[in-house]
Image: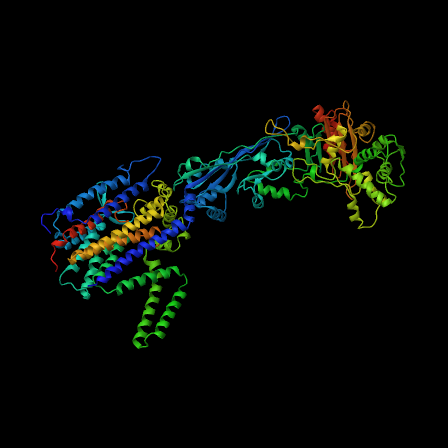
Amino acid sequence: MNQSRRYIIQLVMILTGLIFLVKLFSIQVLDSKYAEAATSNIIHRVIEYPYRGLVFDRNGKLIVYNTPQYNLIVVPTEVKNLDTAKFCEVFNIEKEVFIEKMEEAKDFSYVQPSIFIKQLSNQDLAYVQDYIVDFPGFDIQPRTTRAYAQPIMANALGYVSEINKNQLKRDTLDYYRQGDYIGQSGLEAYYEKQLRGRRGVKFKVKNVRGIEKGPYEDGEYDTLSIPGRNLVSTIDLDLQAYGEDLLQGKSGSIVAIEPASGEILSLVSGPSYDPSLLTGRKYSQNFSRISSDTLKPLFNRPLMAQYRPGSIFKIIQAMVALQEGVINPSTRIVCNRSIIGCHGPHSFEDLEGAIKHSCNPYFHNVMRRVVNQGVSDDTYEDTRIGLAKWRKHVESFGLGSPLGIDLPNEKSGMVPSVEYYDRAYRGEPWKYSNIYSIAIGEGENLVVPLQMANFASIVANRGYYYIPHLVKSIGDNGSPLPKYQEKHYTSVDPKHFDVAVEAMASVVESGTGQYRAKLKDIVVCGKTGTVQNDPMPDHSVFIAFAPKDDPKIAVSVYVEDAGQGARAAASIASLMIEKYLLGATERPFIEEYVKKGEFLY
Amino acid sequence: MRRGDSILSKLDWVTVLLFFLIVIMGWLNIFAAVYDESTNPSIFDLSLNSGRQLMFIATSFILIITIMVIDFKFFDTFGYFIFGGIIFLLIFVLLFGREVAGSKSWFEIGAFRLQPSEFAKFATALAVAKFIGDTNFRMDRIKNQALLFGIIGLPAILIILQGDTGTALVYSVFLLVFFREGMSPILLLLGTAAAIIFILTLLVSNHLYLYGGIAIIAAVIIIFGKKSIRNIALTLAGAIVIAGVIRSVDYVITDVLKPHQQNRIKALINPDADPLGYGWNVTQSKIAIGSGQFFGRGYLNGTQTKYDFVPEQSTDFIFCTIAEEHGWLGSFVIIGLFVTFLLRIIFIAERQKWRFARVYGYGVACIIFFHFAVNIGMTIGLFPVIGIPLPMFSYGGSSLWAFTILIFILIKLDAHRMQVLVR
C-alpha cells in the first residue's frame, strides 16, 4: 500500500541535494564575487605614506618641511551605538553633513577605512582625542602636510594638495590613489617624482572585530615606503626674504641669478601669499580666496608675466649688429629725432654712448642695417632675409621660447618672425619701415623677467649662459638635472660683449643708473628700461650684474606701473646686489625710498 | 535466524558507518570553525567546542549501548509513555527553564545545558509510529488524521511558546510521513502552494501583478475547463481565497512575526538591502561559502570562519566551514553523504515488516531531511535563517544525543526485524 509514495519521497530528497549542489556550484565556482568579498573582508591595506622630501636653500637652511596632521577615519562596520548628536557636537559638523559623509564611506567600503574628516589641526586633535574612544569605528590617522620655515617664496615652491579626478585619470602609470597628495605647482609639481618617494603598503589580516591577526601571506605582498628625496635649492633664503620685503605692496618680480652657474638666487613674485595658507584643513577655503584675488597672487610673474623689453633690448641689438658686422664699437650715428623720439641731451654717439643714453634713432638705424643688408635687390625680400637672420641671433639669447627653468608654466615671450608679419599684414608686402618699433624693444617683442635676468647673466658671462634653475642638488649630495649643466653660447662672438659690459658700467657710473644703482666699492653694470604701458604708468625695469669683473650676481627687476626704470627697479636691483655681496645695504635711504613706494612724481 | 546471535552481527553497519562518518567530520569541522592559529589550540582542548563535542560523542556511546541493551519492544510498548514524559519536560522547561538568546528551552544542570525540545523529536516520531502502527489504524478516518495532527501539534506549540519557532517547524515534516502512510497529498500540495504564494507575495512588491495573474489563471481555467456551475464557482472561490492569502501575508509579516523573524525573511529576499544589519548572517555565510571555490582553501585555512565573519559557525552555520575550506568538492561530499544516509534510512524503513518500525523509520528520515534541507538552504540563501542544526554535524550535546537516540532506535528495531511477525 502506497509503495510508490516511497519513490516520491526519495525523489524529493535527491532533488533537494541536487538543487543545493547546483546553487553551491554557482556561488562557489561560477561567481568570483564572493571570493573577492572574502578577501576584502579580511585584508586591510595599511598604507604607509612616505615622507615627502624636504627643500633646503643653498646655504643649508630649511625652506620646506613636513608637519604631522591628522585625518579622522571611519570603518562603517565598526560603528556601533554611535551618539550622533554628541559626535556632531565634538567635531563641529551638521547632522546632514554627517549622514552624507557616512553614506560616502559606506559606498566606498563597509570594512575598509575611509577618511571622514580631513586634516584636523593639532588643537582640534587635542580636544577630540578625549572623545574618540566613545566613538567606536572612528580613528585618527596621522598624515603629514607641508610646512614652511618662512612665509615666502610661495609661487616658486608651489603647493601640495590632494590629487584631483582629472589628475587621477591622467595618471597612466597608476601610481596615485584617491586621497594621495601631489605637487600642484612650483617646485612641488616639477620635482614631484623625486619628492614624493614611494608609498608602502602593508596587507594585514583582521578578524570581524577589526583585531589584527598578523600579516597577509607572511607579508609577501607588502612594500616598504621609501621617503622622498630632499632638494637643495639654489635659492639664498635671506636674499629671497629681502627681495620679498622690498617688493611688498608692489606688483612685479625680482630674479637674481648666479651667472657662472645659472643658479637662481632669488625668484620673487609680487604680490604673493603665505604658502602655509595652502596646506591643512583650510586649503580649499584659502585656495578659492587666493585664486579669486584680483591682484593675482598665484600668477608667477617672473616666468609668466610678459612685457615688452624696452630699452634693455638695445644691448641685444648692439650685439647682433656687431656680429653681423654692420657696425663696430666706434660707429657714430646722428640722433635724428625726426624719425623716432629720443630723450636726454646727446646728438652723435658711438655704440657705448648710444647704449648709455638709450638713443632711439641710433638703434633704429642699427636695426635697419641688420635687416637690410642688400642681400637681395628686392627691398621686401631683403627685409625678410634680414629679419630671419636677426631673429636667429635674438633667439640664441634665450628669448622667444621658454628657457626651461625647473618650474611649470614658463611663458615663452615673443620674438616676431617673418611668418608673424606675413600673418599680421595678411599677405600685403611689408618692409623695415613697417616693423621698426621692434628696434628699440617696443612693438611685438615680448619677454618675461626670467629671460631678462638670464640676459644680464649672458652679458656678465660675456656670451654664454646656463639655463636658470632652482635646484642644485637632488638628494642631499646630488647634482642638478643634466640640462642645467650644459653651457649655452649665443650666436654672437664673446669678443663683442666687452662693449656691452663697458656700456652697462657707464650707465651706472654716469648714466640713468648713477643716482640709485651706483655702489661705493662695487662696480655695478646695469641698464634701465621704461616699458610703455598706456594708459597706465610705465613699468619700471632694470637689469644689472656685479661686480663688473668676475660677476657674482645678475638681476632683473620689474615693478609694474612704477614709471622710470631708474627709480623703483634700479633701486631694488642695487639693493639686492648689496644684500647678496655685502650682507646688508650701506644706503638705508634707498631702502626707505623703495619701501615707501612713491615712484611717480 | 538463530537466537543468541550477537546483536552486533545484526546491526546495519552501513548506517552506523555513515552516522559516524558524519559525526567525525562534524567534529573536525567544529575544530576548524573555532580554530585560531595565534593560540595554536589542540582539537581535544575542553575549553573549545571541539573538545566538548568529542566528549558528547564519547557519551553518546552510553546512549547507543543502552538502546542496544533495551528490549526492542520497549519502544513500541512505552512509545506513548516516552512521548508523555517529554511533553511534561517541555511544559516543565517552559515554567522553570533558563532563557538563552530569547528562547526559554534549556535546563541548566551544573555547567551543562539540556534542551528537551531536541529530544521531543524522537519521542514524537515514536508516538506517531505507535499511533499509525496500530492494527486498527486507518488513515482515511478524519478522526485519526486529527489525532495525528494533535500528536505533532502538541510539542510544536509548546516549543513555539518557548520562543523557538525554528525547532517547532521541524514537526511539519511529519506531513511527509503521513503522506507515505496514505494521507491524501492535497494537504502537502496546499502547504507547498501556500508557501509559494507567500514567497511570491514577498518577492513581488506590487501586488496588483499577483491579483492580475490570479485573475488570468482563473479566467483560463473557466474558459478552457468544463463549464459547469460547480467548476466555475470552485475556481472563483479558489481565486478569492488566494487573493485573501496574499492580502493577509502582509498582515502576518508586519503584525504577527517578531521583528527578527521579519528581518530573516527580508534577508532571504534581498540580503544586500542591509548587509550589516539583518542581512549580515546570510551575506557573510554566502561570502564564506563562495570563497571556497572549487577546491577550497584547505583545512584550517578558511579565513572567513577563522576570523569570525560567519556567526554561529560551529552550530547553525557549520556548513560554511566545510564549503570554505573544502570548496565545492567538500560540499559535494557532505551533501552526497547526507543524501546517501537519508536514502539508506528509507531503504531500512521500507524493509521493515512491522508497520511501527517502518513509520518510525520514515519519521527518522524526514526529521533528518528537514534539518539538512533547512540548515544548508539557509546558509546558501535559499531559505530564511531558521536556527536549526545540521544533524550529527553541528556542535551541541543535546542535538547530538537526540539524533543518536533517534537513529539508533531505528537501527535497534532494524536489527530485530526478523523477530517480528507480520501483522
Residue A496 appears left or right of B355: right
Residue A193 appears left or right of A411: left
On-image quarter of the N terminus of chain A:
bottom left
Residue A336 place in picture, x, y as percent: 90, 38
Determine whether A501 is above or below B64 in the image.
above
**Between residues B244 and B219, which one lies in front from this camera angle?**
B219
Q: Is residue A580 visible?
A: yes
Q: Is residue B130 visible?
A: no
**Between residues A252 and A596, which one lies in front from this camera angle?**
A252
Determine whether B158 is above or below B223 in the image.
above
Residue at the image point whose x is 28% and y is 40% from the top: B50
Extreme residue toward the bottom, this view: B228
Q: Quadrant of residue A148?
A: top right
The number of numbered discs placed on residues in the rendered structure image is 0
**Between residues A338 and A92, which one lies in front from this camera angle?**
A338
Residue B362 place in picture, x, y as percent: 21, 56
On-image quarter of the C terminus of chain A:
top right
**Between residues B391 and B199, which one lies in front from this camera angle?**
B391
Residue at the image point whose x is 65% and y is 34% from the top: A153
Residue at the image point whose x is 17% and y is 45% from the top: B63
**How does the figure colour the protein chain or chains?**
rainbow
Residue B51 place in picture, x, y as percent: 26, 39
